[in-house]
């Protein structure tokens, strides 16, 4: 089943969800740069891919949003307060995944470096620091912490539905 229906999410929605989940979780390894003044194997291993993975998340998120809008009429609905909270959390996660790549690029540019994705220079190296870009780019980190909180809340909510409510919310996305 490719398309969503009122009982469960289709395979395309599930693929989007789990691929984005894996890439977002991989991005969290960038926090290892804060360990031991940036000298940590996690940061050394995953750090160089951070910008490129952010670009992939942006592309996948836009594609997923377009797919979601197309599927909206037949998607499962969570009624009540749980549904309202889930909808708000999902919208904040989407917002974070859409703005963070741009904020990260502004931060890099603001620090005086070129912005490279897949090794290609998208934005050239400025003559020096760019204060306005750096000021906006500083918001990348707060959005990252917001996204971590939302991901943890998302996982907690899914587990709550599965183990406490004993409903099919988790099964809809797990396949």
Image: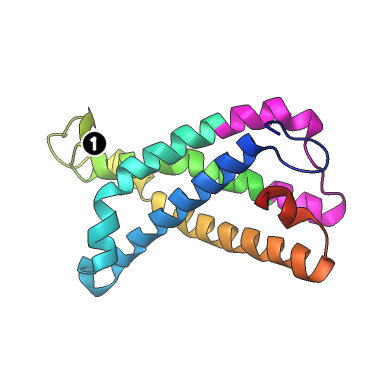
Residue at 74% in and 49% down: 172
Residue at (40%, 38%) from the top-left corner?
Answer: 56
Residue 118 picture location, percent across and down: 26, 35
- Say whether residue 70 is magenta: yes
Residue 165 position (above or below residue 172): below
| Mark 1 burial class by Cα count in 10 Å: few <14, some 14-19, many 20+ | some
- Residue depicted at 23% across the width and 74% down the height: 36
Q: Which residues are magenta?
A: 64-88
Q: Is residue 152 magenta?
A: no
> Could you tell me residue 113's position as x and y percent?
18, 41
Q: Is residue 81 visible?
A: yes
Residue 155 appears left or right of 22: right
- According to the image, label 1 marks what residue? 116
Q: Secondary structure at mark 1?
A: strand
Q: How is the image coloured?
A: rainbow
Q: Could you tell me residue 35's position as x and y percent?
A: 28, 72
Q: Nearer the viewer, residue 9 or 143?
A: 9
Residue 168, image quadrant: bottom right
Label the magenta part by its dominant secondary structure: helix
Figure check: 146 above or below 69: below
């Amino acid at each position: 089943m490719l398309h969503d229906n009122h009982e469960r999410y289709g395979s395309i929605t599930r693929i989007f969800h789990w691929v984005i989940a894996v890439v977002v979780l991989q991005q969290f390894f960038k926090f290892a740069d804060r360990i031991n003044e940036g000298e940590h194997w996690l940061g050394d291993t995953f750090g160089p891919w951070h910008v490129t993975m952010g670009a992939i998340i942006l592309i996948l998120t836009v594609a997923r949003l377009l797919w979601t809008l197309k599927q909206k009429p037949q998607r499962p609905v969570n009624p009540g307060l749980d549904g309202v909270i889930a909808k708000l959390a999902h919208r904040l996660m989407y917002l974070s995944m859409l703005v963070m790549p741009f904020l990260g690029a502004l931060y890099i540019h603001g620090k005086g470096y070129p912005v490279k994705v897949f090794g290609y220079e998208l934005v050239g190296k400025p003559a020096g620091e760019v204060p306005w870009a750096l000021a906006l780019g500083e918001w990348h980190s707060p959005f990252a912490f917001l996204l971590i909180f939302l991901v943890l809340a998302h996982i907690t909510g899914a587990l709550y539905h599965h183990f406490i409510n004993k409903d099919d919310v988790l099964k809809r996305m797990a396949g």
